[in-house]
Amino acid sequence: MRFGMSLGGGERTLSDYLDQIARFEEAGLDTVWCGQLFGTDALTVYALAGASTTRISFGTSILPTYSRHPLLLASQALTTQAATDGRLIVGVGSSHRALVEDVLGVSYQRPAAYLREYLTVLPRLLRGERFAHAGELLRVDTTGVFGRAHVAGADAPPVYVGTMFPLSLKVAGQLADGVITWLVGPNTLVDEVIPIARTAAAEVGRPRPRIVAGIPMAVCAAADVEQHTARVNTFLRRFVALPVYERVLARENATGPADLAAIGDEETMAARLKLFADAGVDEVYGVCFGDDETLLRTAEFLGGLSRD
């Protein structure tokens, strides 16, 4: 199983992010992951980090589909792919109604249908194809004078989908290379996420999609477990109030988001992560809500598991 970490949050400069990525690579992590809203641009950070790293992969978790036309995203992604010597993983997803409608002012009707059209055209755009797509929800035409997405020296990166919804999981299995989940436990992965995605892929003759699971994570002393648990519950309390997470909490017999996390010493962490490996997950990445010392300690622990 592979292991990664999400970039730490808070007020950070570009230099801070680049230093963090360099530390992650030095620690032995397989992948650095970064979400995307409207602050620092993940693909730009990764393009800059490509010059100072040699091995670590760069994953977006996730780029909301409604905020970037697929042709624009293909152009950005291929540029970053070239800058990182082919180490990019493009993670996209529908995001949430509150962001799409309230912030972007875009209709969130039929998100699975929009995702299907998006994934129908994005891989073709990443391959630099010329084609016209006139769907119900999306239009793309690279046959005319304005051309196609093409960056010299950049091969098409893999495309993953961030989702836990059954309809979108089916779309991901049929059209994408992998699935990314956030705050989903091993029971939900075994019972729903993995079988839906893999069955959908098999039905259309596609390879088995890779499964990446992101969870809150903190390697810490026993005396600090309560503090980190409270921090996770505080930060994610509103997040798990979304109806879809009520089902996840019930399936995992969890009372709060920290029950879906991995918090504790190295032995406790190893036992928790083994549950994800046994579930069939290909990669687990951590999101640390603690200080930078905890972030680095967690990264070094996961990097050690990667080397093993």
Image (cartoon, helix red, strand yellow):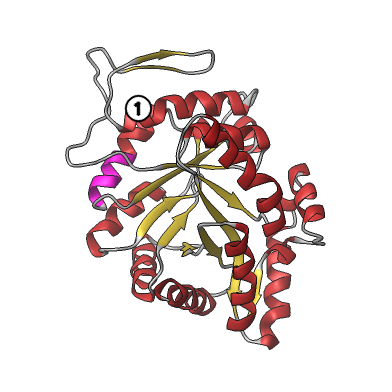
Q: Is residue 8 left or right of residue 130?
A: right
Residue span colored magenta: 77-83
Query: Which residue is labeled 1 in the image?
Result: 124
The number of numbered badges drawn on the structure is 1
Q: Does the image show residue 265? A: no
- The residue that appears at 59% across and 74% down in the rendered structure is 218
Quadrant hosting residue 289: bottom right
Considering the numbered disc 1 on the image, is that residue within a helix, a strand or a loop? helix
Residue 90 pos. (x, y %): 41, 44
Is 17 magenta? The answer is: no
Position above or below: 276 against 41: below
Position above or below: 115 against 3: above
- The residue that appears at 39% across and 63% down in the rendered structure is 17
Q: Does the image show residue 61? A: yes
- The residue that appears at 71% across and 49% down in the rendered structure is 191
* Front residue (pair 252, 298): 252
Residue type indicated by callout 1 = Arg
Residue 194 pos. (x, y %): 61, 47
- The residue that appears at 58% across and 40% down in the rendered structure is 197
* Front residue (pair 271, 75): 271
Residue 183 pos. (x, y %): 65, 56
Quadrant hosting residue 216: bottom right
Position above or below: 205 against 246: above
Q: Is residue 164 left or right of residue 259?
A: left
Residue 141 pos. (x, y %): 34, 15
Quadrant where the C terminus is found in the figure? bottom left
Q: Is residue 51 left or right of residue 33?
A: left
Is 79 magenta? The answer is: yes
